[in-house]
Image (cartoon, coloured by chain):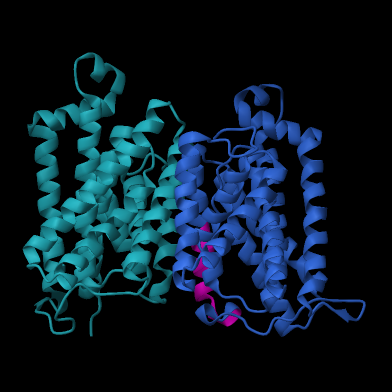
Amino acid sequence: MNIVPQLVLNSVIAGAIYMMIALGFNLIYGTVKFFDLGYGVLTAVGGYAVFFFYKKLELGLPVSIVLGILIAGLIGYLVNKFVYTKLRERKASNMVLLVASLGVFTALQALIAMLFSSQFQTLSTNAGSSTTFEIYGAVITLVQLVILISGLVITGLLALTMNKTMFGKAIKAVSDDEEVSKIVGINTQKIISGVFFIGAMIAGLAGILVGFDTGIEPTMGMSLLLKGVIASIIGGIGNVYGGVLGAFLLGFVENFGIWKISGEWKDAIAFTLLILFLLFRPQGILKK
Amino acid sequence: MEYFIHLAILVSIYAILGLSLNLVVGYTGLLSISQAAFYGIGAYTTAILLTRFDLNFFVSILAGIVITGVCSLLIGFVLSRFKEDYYALGSFGFNIIVYSIFLNWQSLTQGPLGIPGITRPTIFGFSLSENIAFLGLAVVGGILIFFFCEFIAKSSFGRVLKAIREDEQAIEIFGYKTLYYKLAIFVLSAMIASVAGSFFASYITFIDPSTFTLNESIFILSIIILGGLANLKGSVLGALFLILLPEALRFVGFPTDIAAQMRQLVYGVLLVVLMLYRPQGLLGEYKL
């Protein structure tokens, strides 16, 4: 059996997930210029919020997903408001913000584990019997198809927001120069809050989709975050389109890398790719 | 009583880890989040040499120091190309790669099953199988390492490190090759962490990869940030506080699995609060 079509498909699906995380991460990095590692845990927040509404309270699926995305967005917004904004006002260095975001990450992850136990759980109700499609001998599940479509829709929506709306233009202005944006009358606080809210919603959605595809556990955020960060950096940090390229490159390298060896090596392969890029092309594929 | 001896041994081991990391983060200003990797390399060296080759514990410590030294030299060489938050991210990556190796190089490390049956050290035919005897060894080791670190910090070498932290360019103009200084302290710090790993492996008599994750590195980082950067007494204080506090929570009546998450929650929140209100920690002289 030819395994290549399946590997290609797996790479594209992984790429779509990484792309969503990288988009949100890049959006935040581009605006506030620090590595927000706390961003990763928002995927778990989204996943567990849906788990709570859909499986515990037995609300409808669409309502649960919308609530999950909104809650992830809200948490991202609150963390920015009560932690990062205060630090930025004090002109804290990037390293202080990075350590604080690491604290946010650890604390929220532990909180989720305390509320929902640290066991691996799945969101889908019909695990194993879901609808599948076949493309050139490769199998794709319905959830994975939704992942691909969501990836496209999110990218499209984000591109539209960034280029066609006042809000998007304001984001670009703040990324270019926060001080000058303030002077020309842009409410930078509000824009940054909005960026955190949107970025967090994207992370929440990615977490929910992963939850339906494989499952959720409190520690899921770290590996997703790292993949998103790697995709952003190898694509060109702060460059939204670079993140998209980086995500798919990472997806392909990872999935073809484990063709002959155990799948457990994925993370090591991803980081080796990152370190190679940092050494030989630190500005990423597309320079900002 | 046995329980207090157990805690005292853990505090000694984490104090050693804290001291070693403080040399890099506190004195030199390099935000390294990979100490658990070197801690793990030391632990695995001791475990493998004691269980398979039946070597003396103290020989295994030396072997661990040498192996960790070589690994950290290679890693440090790559990391020295990066600055500030990229440095943190790169060190992150190496921690994940080393963890993957512990997990996947099964013929050497037995993967997730771990290595059981590690023996306790013997000195002149006297076995330290009693915990109280082992505590003696750990405390003596810890004190020796404390004075060694203090010696480094107060030497002319240590002053150059502080100068690198404050203004790397300025000290370079005076003709110091900062690259060699940064590499030297990174390797030295990794070697000390490896000793802590050897102690840990021999004390617990069983190790598996789950001890040497990124979370452990974050934990060690919070020890030194809480205690104070560039203050060696602070690192000991931080270890004491962060090991004992979760134990105290257990006495208040939380079940064990919640208590484990509680430890993470506590140091996560602590990192955020410290960054917000006291970025130099309890006794520190340097802010990130």
Task: Judge by depth and name the residue closer to the eye, B123 or B192.
Answer: B123
Pick whichever, A197 or A15, lies toward us: A197
User: Residue reaching furthest front?
Assistant: B252
| Residue A39 image point, x, y percent | 32, 49
Going 33% across and 59% down the picture, which residue do you hit? A224
Query: Is residue B33 part of the magenta span, yes or no?
Result: no
Quadrant placement of the N terminus of chain B: bottom right
| Highlighted range, magenta | B95-108
Q: Residue furthest top?
A: A183
Is B81 situated left or right of A207 in this image? right
State the image coordinates of residue A100 (x, y, percent, origin top left).
44, 43
Chain that the image shows in blue: B
Q: Position of residue B139 (x, y in %)?
A: 79, 61
Q: Colour of chain A?
A: cyan
Q: Residue at x 47, y 31 (%)?
A: A93
Please state the horizontal and vertical placement of residue B257, each as a whole percent of the image: 46, 72
